[in-house]
Image: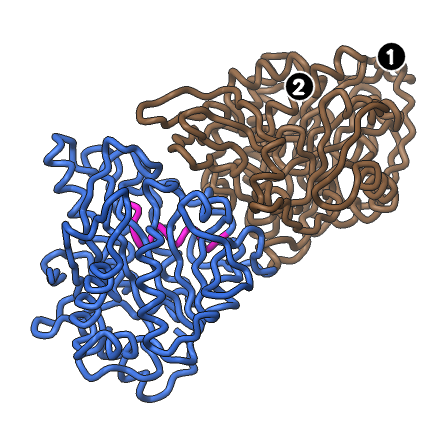
Amino acid sequence: MSMKRSRRQFVCESLVLAAGGAGLSCSAEPSNPPAPGASTASKKALVVRAQRPTVAGGSGGFDPTILDEMLRVCLVRLTNTADSAAAWKALFSAKDRVALKINTLGGKGLSTNPAVVEAIVRGLIGAGVTESNILVWDRFNRELIRAGFRINEGGKGYRCYGTESAYEGNITSHGKIGGFLSTLLTQFPTALINVPIVKDHNLAGVAISMKSLYGLIDNPNRYHDNNCDPYIADMGDLPVVREKMRLIICDALFGQYEAGPAYQPRFRWAANTLMVATDPVALDTTGWRMIEAKRREAGLKPLTEAGRPPRWLATAAARGLGQNDPDKIEVVDC
Amino acid sequence: MTGSYCWKSALGFDRREFLRSVVGGACAACALAKTVGSERAAAQDAMPDRGPEGVAAASDKFVAPARHWEKRENQRVLCTLCPRQCEVADLERGGCGVRENRGGEYFTLVYNRPCSLNVDPIEKKPLFHFLPGTTAFSTATAGCNIWCRFCQNWAISQKRPEQVRAAYMKPDEMVDFAQREGSPTIAFTYNEPVVFYEWMYDIAAAAKKRAVRSVMISNGYIQKKPLRELCQVLSAVKIDLKAFTEKFYKDLCDGQLKPVLDTLVELKAIGIWFEIVVLIIPTLNDGEQECRDMVKWVVQNLGPDVPMHFSCFHPMYMLNNLPSTSSRVVERNRKIAMDAGVRYSYVGNVAGSPGENTLCHSCGKQIVDRYGYHTTSRVTAAGKCPHCGTAIPGVWK
């Protein structure tokens, strides 16, 4: 973590750690105790979900009013604040430059939905963040376009573009990973929101928030041996990630339980859910359980028996990145 | 070059300018390359290869069907080109970063996509028993199937193709260029040529029809079947044997030793000419016993006629904390090899060392003089020692 911390921030982070949450950064203006991501009563890691079957509108779209409400209830519960504005302000300030790392590898059928991103942007603007200081990004423009996003490199509104080849000039080496990080992570933002989806992965087992971090580095192809362990944990443990990552808002409007990471329509289900957390390990563990539940329904083997256990979750937990024990995760359904 | 072909780059320069810029700099780069490590590619500026939609529009011209793979369920593929045996899901790439699954079909992303073009002395590969004193028109793409922390060409080998500036050159155009530059050989080198197998094979096949030879400078990480097919169109191979322990390969290369040894045995069985290079790195693979074990294995499994080169490491890439290798260590290794029965052993990256000269294994007289890249060979056209008439293993004409 960065050493440039105010005393208030140090206290905030200590509360997060003590509550079993991840060592994620807090805003310069921390909320009232308990800190974001911590369960109120049990000191478990907290994952908050909102499921609304009515969120799916006609012709494949999603109702923005319902999305706003889902996001509001989740964040209010996560931050233990009174309303949406207070919830966002507990995590972000007007001075922040916020990057939303989305996941668009799977194309339109299995990517972060633009409607979810729009809801997040509305929330950030409500917290005082300047719209032009919001960047929505993934690796490539073509993947963003394919997922339904409009590229905006400097026009009106929030920014949206891919890393393409904008990587740092110096190698970052951490654990077993070594490569060049995207400047959209290292240079643009003061704060990062991870906006992943929920899907299985043929090697990692599941690809949710932590696997999505592979989009931060230029050579993710190197990190798939041994079911991506410890590489996913190493990515999550990068100092720049631990410093900047404030929040995970998981777009689980759809999920996919088999044949990922690419889109396979017959294995996709409408979960109509948003999940939020500050603990990436807890969130991914929760998403894993959702996938396993669907696999059971479909008569498929659990991922461990299918030869792709997400063992990197235990590695990430051992690194202090979060909680992977379901008994120590409180999942609150709002 | 074929005059009717008109080529315009999305990058704002034409192919003629690109080729002039690399070939013109080749000779000046030679001496430098000799001192800092052989087989260093021309400097590459990372430059996005992008069109209006980003990289895809400009790069799809480099996409071609891959060879040596199998379909799996749910649109996955199993790549059978190298020992990594990557199982690749739709939209993902293999470990090499240059082969991609698209809808259950596997593609190479670097066909006709050289990012490095140089005319090098053949000794720079190094190949010392293959047409000495001639040049090799050398090329590479982005990508590699292992990850050596000391790679001297990491700026292309450890990058994805969209991160590296490239030209567009078809196989026959590569042969045209080699002939125009007076190179009897095309060398696939700098990065790991196995990862651009399809383009390499097609160039070598085209070259063979026009009496131009091809050589592969490789880490040996290739499966038996593609290797056998490839050797039908190649004339020689040089294998980088990184070390003689699995631990080194695992910790420093993300690879394994055994597949490389299997490749060496296979090359012997195929009967193609090949040489071995070992880059000696202080504290990591410079032990005397490791050298003894290695050369013993070489003599027992490959015979005494496979030349072995022991080269000095220089701080590079992710191993900038280690010193350069002392010339005494590589000279020691050379002596160990020759005492163990390796008939032709050399030192590398030690300019002016007598360990770069070739001595007849029978009469001991010097038959090829080397100083830097100045080479004088007295081996007869029939491949014999001019003093005692002994057949000298290699390709001499």
**Residue B202: mark:** 2
Which chain is displayed in blue in the rendered image?
A: A
Q: Position of residue B277 (x, y in %)?
A: 66, 34
Disc 2 or 1, which lies upstream in sequence? 2
- In the image, residue B47 above or below residue B123: below
The one nearer the camera, B194 or A120, is A120
Identify the subunit bearing mark 2.
B
Q: Quadrant of residue A226?
A: top left
The one nearer the camera, B291 or A214, is A214
Residue ID for mark 1: B389
Which amino acid, mark 2?
Asp
| Label 1 crowd (10 A; few <14 / some 14-19 / many >=20) | some
> B358 left or right of A7?
right
Q: Is residue B367 visible?
A: no
Quadrant location of the N terminus of chain B? top right
- In the image, residue B33 above or below residue B200: below
User: Which residue is at a point 92% across and 29% down the rendered structure image?
Assistant: B376
Quote the CA–CA distance across marks 2 and 1: 38 Å
Which amino acid, mark 1?
Gly
> B100 left or right of B109?
left
Q: Secondary structure at mark 2?
A: helix
User: Which residue is at a point 85% across and 14% down the rendered structure image?
Assistant: B384
Q: Position of residue A142 (x, y in %)?
A: 50, 44
Looking at this rendering, what residue extends furthest in the front direction?
Answer: A58
Identify the subunit bearing mark 1.
B
Q: Which residues are magenta?
A: A206-217
